[in-house]
Image (tube, grey):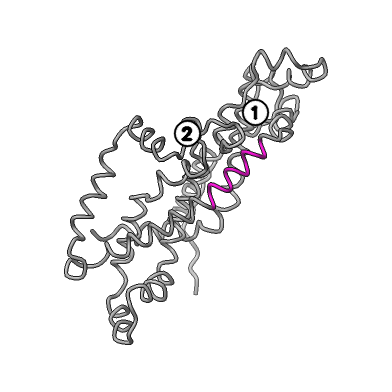
Amino acid sequence: MVKSQTIGARLANALILFTLAVIAFLSLAPMLNTIMISISSSTAVNAGQVNFFPVDLNFSSYVKILNDTKFWQAFTVSVERVVLGGAINMLLTVLMAYPLSRNVSQFRSRNVYMWIIIFTMLFSGGIVPWYMVISELNLINTIWALVLPGAVPVFNVILLMNFFRGIPKELEEAAFIDGAGPLRILRHIFLPVSLPSLATITLFVIVGHWNNFFDGIVLINDSDKIPLQTYLQQLSLTRDQMQNMTVEQLQQYNKVSNTTLNSAKILVSMIPIMLIYPFLQRYLIHGIVLGSVKE
């Protein structure tokens, strides 16, 4: 038999729901404001009249972005970068995390390699040596300049290594007795059991590659090879562009300001991640927690 709640319990539940509603609104308010700015007129935005409802509705910012062949070229480059870089990251992360998850008796140099990768997390060689190495390898202005320098994400390696160390040793011992080698144990036991951690790392890798714009500015010289985030960072109207426009084009672009255009950039760049995130979200917290409880 379910007992009816007291007045105090009901008030407590109402207070909790109200608090959660306020937190949710505060979390969504910046995104909602950005959406409204992107679909409002530049005059209303510059006057500070746009909050959570559009003013003088127009989609000129999106028209400017989407009716541009360079946008789709940059989008294709980013997709290629995510697919190629993600595959390399995941492969090297798994192949590095697995031996580091072994004991010193199984892998004698394990502690040496652990100190090396931890050192790389704490100290960096700097931007100039980073650029010089990539230049000497003739990677400048190629897709490989965007994926190879960060091919081994150390944080992901440690996360997956700790997850591997939490897998019961009895599973590995049983497979070893049956004649399975290290690679077969990794493929048939460790990887299937580690789906939450692998999904979490996959999400980190995809977001990292998709959102990175700095290396595209520094390492890519050809405008046809820059990734989407770099293209969106550089997207703005200049005086020379406006001088070459017709009267109709000027009237169209008068509706666009840097604020509305930047808001549209943010939303366009968020769409692919928002489409992928729901499929991996349920693994995110579970994978992080399980991968962080051991040394």
Q: Does 238 lie within the magenta span?
A: no
Mark 2–mark 1 CB contact (< 8 Å)? no
The vertical placement of 182 against 14, above or below, is below
Range of magenta residues: 71-83
Q: Give residue 37's mark.
A: 1
Q: Name the residue under label 2.
A: 219
Q: Give residue 62's mark.
A: none
Residue 63 in the image: state x and y as whole percent. 74, 31
Q: Does 79 lie within the magenta span?
A: yes
**Most distant residue in the bottom direction:** 178
Q: Quadrant of residue 45?
A: top right
Residue at x-position 23% and y-position 55%: 113
Of residue 111 and residue 221, the one placed in the foreground of this image is: 221
Residue at x-position 67% and y-position 39%: 72
Q: Magenta segment, principal secondary structure?
A: helix
Residue 222 in the image: state x and y as whole percent. 57, 32
Q: In this view, does 73 lie to the left or right of 104?
A: right
Q: In which quarter of the image is the C terminus?
A: bottom left
Nearer the observer, disc 2 or disc 1?
A: 2
